[in-house]
């Protein structure tokens, strides 16, 4: 199983909340809209010819994590984890991938199984916890791969957070914080 992280920044989204909404949005602009049909375009534009050579070398030598991965290195049924700056926000399962030679700004695309898109609870996995669980720094531009043990640790923590949130909700703690506003 292949597990890769797709990082996002404020150049694309105003915050992790906007990314979460976009991932599950089936309106005109969202990933699950009819026009997109679960297709995620990977932006890449090398700034110099030297950068272009480095990317091609990394792809040819299959150096994971250095640059946007060529779609052939993300096999069907891979898991993609979406991050925004210092937080993991969700994941999805790859249906298939492709390359668009006519679009040099977004040359790669990944189609996700629409029903596989999941959103993680707010602030469940921030940078410090991510490092503790995986031994890696939270990616900003790289596309790191995780092994199954690292991914399982992340999912276990997501489950713990969801259970904690449910207990707080059952106790009415969400109402207490709301009434203080």
Image: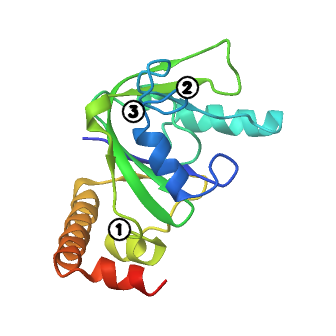
What kind of colouring is applied to the model shown? rainbow
Return the disc, 3 or 2, that comes first in the chain's sequence: 3
Assign a secondary structure to mark 3: loop
The earlier-in-sequence mark between 3 and 1 is 3
Q: Is residue 65 above or below residue 173?
A: above
Local packing at callout 1 (Cα closer than 10 Å; few below 14, some 14-19, many 20+) is: some
Report helix, strand or loop for mark 2.
strand
Side (left or right) of 40 relative to 4: right
Q: Residue at x 70, y 27 (%)?
A: 105
Relative placement, left or right, of 175 versus 149 is right
Separation of residues labelled 1 and 2 (CA atoms): 27 Å
Q: How many marks?
A: 3
Work out whether residue 83 or residue 98 is closer to the camera in this orientation and state it.
83
- Image location of residue 76, percent across then percent down: 30, 27
**Residue, disc 3:** 74
Q: Earlier in the sequence, mark 1 or mark 2?
A: 2
Residue at (44%, 37%) from the top-left corner? Answer: 25
**Cα distance in 3D space between marks 3 and 1:** 20 Å
- Give whichever of 116, 147 is nearer the camera: 116
Q: CA distance from mark 3 to mark 2?
A: 11 Å
Mark nearest the camera among 3 and 2 is 2
> Is any part of residue 130 visible from this angle?
yes
Per the rendering, the mark at residue 57 is: none
Disc 1 element: helix
Residue lying farthest to the front in this orientation: 179
At horizontal 22% and vertical 74% (from top left) the residue drawn is 169
To which residue does mark 2 refer? 108
Q: Where is residue 83 shown, x and y percent of the image?
A: 48, 55
Q: x, y (%) of residue 95?
A: 32, 25
Which residue bears the numbered disc 1? Answer: 134
From the viewer's perspective, tell me whether residue 16 is left or right of residue 175. Answer: right
């Amino acid at each position: 199983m292949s597990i890769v992280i797709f990082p996002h920044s404020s150049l694309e989204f105003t915050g992790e909340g906007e990314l979460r909404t976009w991932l599950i949005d089936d309106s005109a602009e969202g990933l699950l809209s009819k026009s997109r049909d679960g297709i995620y375009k990977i932006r890449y534009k090398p700034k110099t010819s030297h950068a272009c050579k480095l990317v091609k070398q990394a792809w040819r030598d299959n150096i994971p994590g250095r640059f946007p991965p060529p779609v052939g290195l993300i096999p069907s049924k891979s898991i993609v984890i979406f991050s925004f700056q210092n937080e993991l926000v969700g994941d999805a399962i790859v249906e298939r991938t492709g390359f668009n030679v006519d679009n040099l700004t977004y040359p790669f695309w990944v189609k996700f199984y629409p029903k596989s898109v999941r959103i993680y609870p707010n602030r469940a996995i921030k940078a410090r916890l991510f490092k503790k669980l995986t031994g890696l720094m939270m990616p900003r531009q790289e596309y790191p791969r995780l092994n199954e043990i690292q991914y399982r640790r992340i999912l276990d923590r997501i489950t713990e957070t969801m259970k904690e949130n449910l207990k707080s909700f059952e106790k009415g703690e969400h109402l207490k914080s709301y009434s203080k506003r």
